[in-house]
Image (spheres, coloured by chain):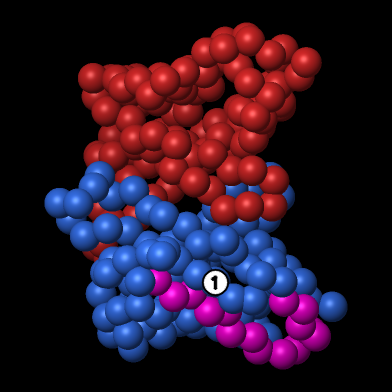
Chain colours: A red, B blue
Amino acid sequence: RKEVEQDPGPFNVPEGATVAFNCTYSNSASQSFFWYRQDCRKEPKLLMSVYSSGNEDGRFTAQLNRASQYISLLIRDSKLSDSATYLCAVSSFTGGGNKLTFGTGTQLKVEL
Amino acid sequence: DGGITQSPKYLFRKEGQNVTLSCEQNLNHDAMYWYRQDPGQGLRLIYYSQIVNDFQKGDIAEGYSVSREKKESFPLTVTSAQKNPTAFYLCASRPPPGQGLNEQFFGPGTRLTVL
């Protein structure tokens, strides 16, 4: 089983739709959780950190469920500019220090 | 401007040659990381360094080498022993403990093609 798993998509949604992505992780000792956005042929950019209590940033809401070991990202009122690949990332400590493990990403296409 | 820079943006190499990718940051971050990204496989960790003069192998270190002689710089050498070096290489750094949640910030990447 992969450490971090995401549905690769693509999710094709009309402009204005609400779309949700899930990401599951296998290491119960994982400490921090993030969503990154990656545009085609560009570097990933941090979208939001995910807190246990959930957090919201404008149209974006992230949730963490430690019991079921998954994080989610909800995008409301989708815009064409939201089209990108969304990567979840999970932080854990190893003997060598802190590492992030990334999912393979979920591709979102917002259409007119 | 503070940030992470990688050079060059595109790199072409003949099979059998070693090549070094540059990564520099002026964010005063201690920890730095190298990943490669292939289509459909997400980011895979090659090497990371928590502090100057120290580094650790990641999940796919074979065929790669690094050095960390300065806090600002973490160059990656792709050696001729790397079987499939064509990929998108990303460098990242992480703020010190207490200044975040262990998130990482990425440079713009180097796209390496072996001919």
Q: Where is residue B104 in the image (x, y as percent from the top left)?
A: 38, 53
Count how many numbered circles sit on residues in the image. 1
Residue A73 versus residue B50 in the image, above or below: above
Looking at the image, can residue A81 be seen?
A: yes
Residue farthest toward the right in the current orientation of the protein: B115
Residue A58 belongs to the span the image colors magenta: no
Q: In this view, does B102 lie to the left or right of B21?
A: left
Q: Position of residue B39 (x, y in %)?
A: 71, 50
Q: Position of residue A15 (x, y in %)?
A: 69, 14
Q: For mark 1, give the secondary structure.
A: strand
Q: Would you identify the image quadrant in which residue B71 lies?
A: bottom left
Q: Which residue is drawn at 23% across and 19% down?
A: A53
Residue indicated by mark 1: B6
Residue B27 versus residue B54 in the image, above or below: above
Characterize the local packing of mark 1: few (<14), some (14-19) or many (20 or more) Cα atoms within 10 angstroms: many
Which three-letter amino acid code belongs to the residue tagged 1? Gln
Q: In this view, does A78 lie to the left or right of B70?
A: right
Magenta-colored span = B11-25
Q: Is residue B16 left or right of residue B55?
A: right
Q: Which residue is drawn at 61% across and 28% down?
A: A82
Nearer to me, A26 or A18? A18
Residue A50 versus residue B18 in the image, above or below: above
Q: Where is residue A72 in the image (x, y as percent from the top left)?
A: 44, 22
Residue farthest toward the left in the current orientation of the protein: B98
Q: Which residue is drawn at 52% across and 13% down?
A: A76
Q: Would you identify the image quadrant in which residue B81 lies?
A: bottom right
Q: Mark 1 lies on which chain?
A: B
Q: In this view, does B4 lie to the left or right of A43?
A: left
